Image: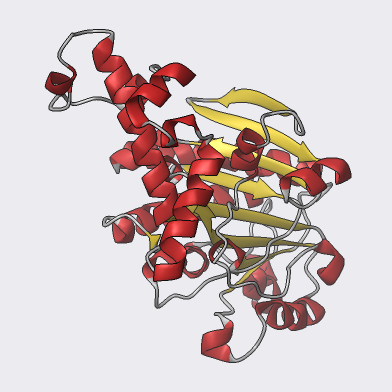
């Protein structure tokens, strides 16, 4: 099975930073990186043409509720910016679609957000006088997956859109990453639509603005990574650890028992000749070549497993709380 990344930021890094351009800004205490994929870049990177914004919040891995609240507030402003860029007006009715299988924890992000997000469409229909100014019509649906419903998710959503006629659709889904460090720390917003299940080789009908006839905003958080990627990451951390130790001490073994942060490791990138010395033939390969090699080794024997953190139930709860709060703050403007 060929494993790919759902994150345009990782595609940007793998492209050698030649095919794509990136804009960076700080939103409160978090990083926002904006990438636009042109038709030419789409062919080179494998990503669909469109805008991809990456909101980075490594603080979320601490599972600190204060950081969840801060991230939700910052992300809400990013979502508002993105809606403005797609010309979605403040009073435009919105359908929130939570993709994924609620029976599988790392795939339950979308359904969990739908369960927690504030919906108002029924209030406008049944009791419009009770709706205060500044709230917009919102509906939410978790359509399930084909294995549970026997229907394509895109077809289910298209029927709902034809009935309720929202002006835009926000699709929430769990993503796959090429690096374990991005799990539950990265939020991607995209105007290019989404292929449910594509990150783990289970392609379903694409969900995009061409299919629905209205803007589609895909919001996702990576929750899984494959074994080949973890192996590649581990070798990279090994090289950086030895590099870090070699610059501090003549006994490389002593640092192996020292606690190090990811930031510290990333500041100690080994030079090509050092990688060759540390890792031999594998050290001379690029990261992409290493990952392809590990996939070739692991896939035929069924060992290129799709992996999620052991704390994934806590992370999914945290991520769904954050996304639901961010959407509520971004979509409604109570007076």
Of 332 and 262, the residue lying toward us: 262
Residue 236 image point, x, y percent? 39, 33
239 in relation to 85, above or below: above
Say left or right for 208 vs 179: right
Say left or right for 156 vs 7: right
Is residue 223 among what the camera can see? no
135 in relation to 24, above or below: below
Of 182 and 131, the residue lying toward us: 182
Give the residue at x 41% y 24%.
275
Of 162 and 287, the residue lying toward us: 287
Give the residue at x 37% y 46%.
231
Q: In which quadrant is the N terminus drawn?
A: bottom right
Residue 307 image point, x, y percent? 37, 59
Give the residue at x 55% y 80%.
144
Name the residue at the bottom extreme.
Answer: 150
The quadrant in which residue 67 appears is top left
Give the residue at x 38% y 58%.
316
181 in relation to 141, above or below: above
Q: In which quadrant is the C terminus drawn?
A: top right
Of 253 and 211, the residue lying toward us: 253
The quadrant in which residue 44 appears is top right
Is residue 232 among what the camera can see? yes
State the colouring used for the structure image.
Answer: secondary structure
Residue 100 image point, x, y percent? 52, 71
The quadrant in which residue 238 appears is top left
Say left or right for 67 vs 171: left
Total numbered badges shown on the rendered structure = 0
Say left or right for 137 vs 99: right
């Amino acid at each position: 099975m060929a494993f790919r990344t759902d994150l345009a930021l990782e595609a940007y890094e793998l492209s050698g930073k030649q095919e794509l351009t990136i804009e960076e800004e700080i939103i409160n205490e978090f990083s926002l990186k904006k990438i636009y994929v042109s038709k030419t870049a789409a062919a080179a990177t494998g990503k669909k043409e469109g805008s991809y914004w990456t909101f980075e919040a490594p603080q979320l891995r601490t599972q600190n509720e204060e950081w969840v609240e801060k991230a939700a507030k910052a992300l809400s402003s990013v979502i508002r910016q993105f809606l403005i860029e797609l010309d979605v007006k403040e009073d435009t009715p919105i359908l929130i679609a939570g993709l994924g299988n609620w029976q599988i924890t790392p795939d339950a992000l979308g359904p969990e957000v739908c369960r927690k997000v504030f919906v108002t469409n029924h209030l406008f229909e049944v009791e419009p006088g009770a709706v205060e100014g500044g709230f917009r019509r919102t509906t939410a649906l978790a359509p399930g997956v084909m294995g549970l419903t026997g229907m394509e998710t895109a077809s289910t959503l298209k029927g709902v859109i034809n009935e309720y006629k929202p002006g835009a659709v926000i699709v929430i889904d769990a993503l796959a990453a090429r690096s374990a460090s991005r799990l539950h720390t990265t939020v991607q917003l995209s105007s290019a639509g989404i292929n449910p299940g594509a990150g783990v080789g289970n392609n379903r009908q694409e969900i995009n603005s061409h299919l629905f006839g209205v803007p589609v905003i895909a919001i996702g958080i990576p929750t899984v990574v494959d074994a080949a990627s973890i192996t590649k990451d581990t070798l990279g951390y090994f090289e950086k650890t030895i590099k870090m130790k070699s610059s501090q001490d003549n006994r490389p073994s002593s640092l192996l028992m020292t606690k190090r942060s990811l930031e510290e490791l990333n500041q100690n990138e080994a030079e090509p000749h050092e990688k060759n010395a540390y890792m031999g033939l594998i050290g001379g390969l690029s990261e992409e070549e290493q990952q392809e090699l590990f996939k070739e080794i692991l896939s035929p024997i069924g060992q290129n497993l799709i992996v999620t953190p052991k704390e994934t139930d806590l992370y999914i709860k945290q991520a769904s709380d954050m996304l639901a709060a961010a959407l509520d703050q971004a979509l409604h403007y109570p007076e």
